[in-house]
Image: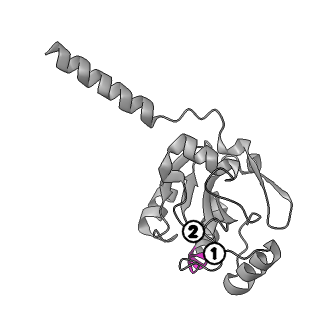
Amino acid sequence: MRKVILLLSLIMLFFKISASANYEKIFYDFSIESITGETINFKDYKNKIILVVNTASYCGFTKQYEELQELWDLYREKGLIVLGVPSNSFNQEKSDNADVKKFCEVNFNIDFPLTTITEVKGKNAHEIFKWAKENHGTSAVPKWNFHKILINKEGKIEDTFASITKPMSKKLIKTIENIL
């Protein structure tokens, strides 16, 4: 019986260690370049929640821009930042920041913050995506465009959502409302 208890204790300890993030840095410790070339310091977003979404202009999920803007319009006054991160990591983005910006404004009236075209996976990924993987595991690594990473007010990852999860889905809205 003691062996069973010891074995169960070790297993529980293993899962506790493997599931906990060390968070040597939090999201607010980073910055990224905006689509127009200015620095976006995430420390300016302290005490807000941030939905980080890797986007692309030529993707089957590109219509999610509409719901991302709707989400931004509904919750920005309550403390939500929607951050679009255009990326060509899946070979579906324009090659020029100005073209991406124009595409988003003309087709979707986007006025939430957008970053410069950024790598989101692999060894050349931006440091926020490397940080997300390190602290939340592979579920934080974009498998495709319009992958969503939700950062809570403490600057830590609250949850991640696959590309198929629409921005106005009940699941995502409920999670946002619970942490606002």
Which of the 4 quarters of the picture holds residue 8?
top left
- Determine the CA span between mark 2 and mark 1: 8 Å
User: How far across and down, in percent of the image, does residue 39 sit?
Assistant: 83, 55
Point out residue 111 in the picture as x, y percentages from the top left corner: 73, 73
Residue nearer the viewer, 129 or 157: 129
- Left or right, 173 with respect to 44, comes to left
Q: Main secondary structure of the magenta part?
A: helix
Q: Residues within 10 Å of mark 1 (few under 14, many from 20)?
A: some
Residue on which disc 2 sits = 145
As displayed, is residue 97 above or below residue 7? below
Find the residue positioned furthest to the top. Answer: 2
Magenta span: 63-67
Q: Which of pointers 2 and 1 indicates the residue nearer the eye?
A: 1
Q: Which residue is mark 1?
A: 92
> Image check: 153 left or right of 37?
left
- Residue found at x 57% / y 68%: 145
Q: Is residue 65 magenta?
A: yes
Residue at the far left in the pictured view: 1
Residue 115 visible in the snapshot? yes
Q: Amino acid at mark 2?
A: Asn
Residue 108 higher or lower than 43, as above or below? below
Which part of the image, by quadrant, shows the N terminus? top left
Q: Nearer the viewer, residue 110 or 85?
A: 85
Per the image, is 118 magenta? Answer: no
Instruction: Evaluate whether residue 153 shows in this view.
Output: no
Q: Are marks 2 and 1 in contact (CB under 8 Å)?
A: yes
Secondary structure, mark 1, is loop
Q: Position of residue 11 (x, y in %)?
A: 30, 27
Q: Which secondary structure, mark 2?
A: loop
Q: Which mark is residue 113?
A: none
Query: Callout 2 environment at 10 Å: few (<14), some (14 to 19), or many (20+)?
Result: many
Residue type (three-letter) at the residue carrying disc 1 = Gln
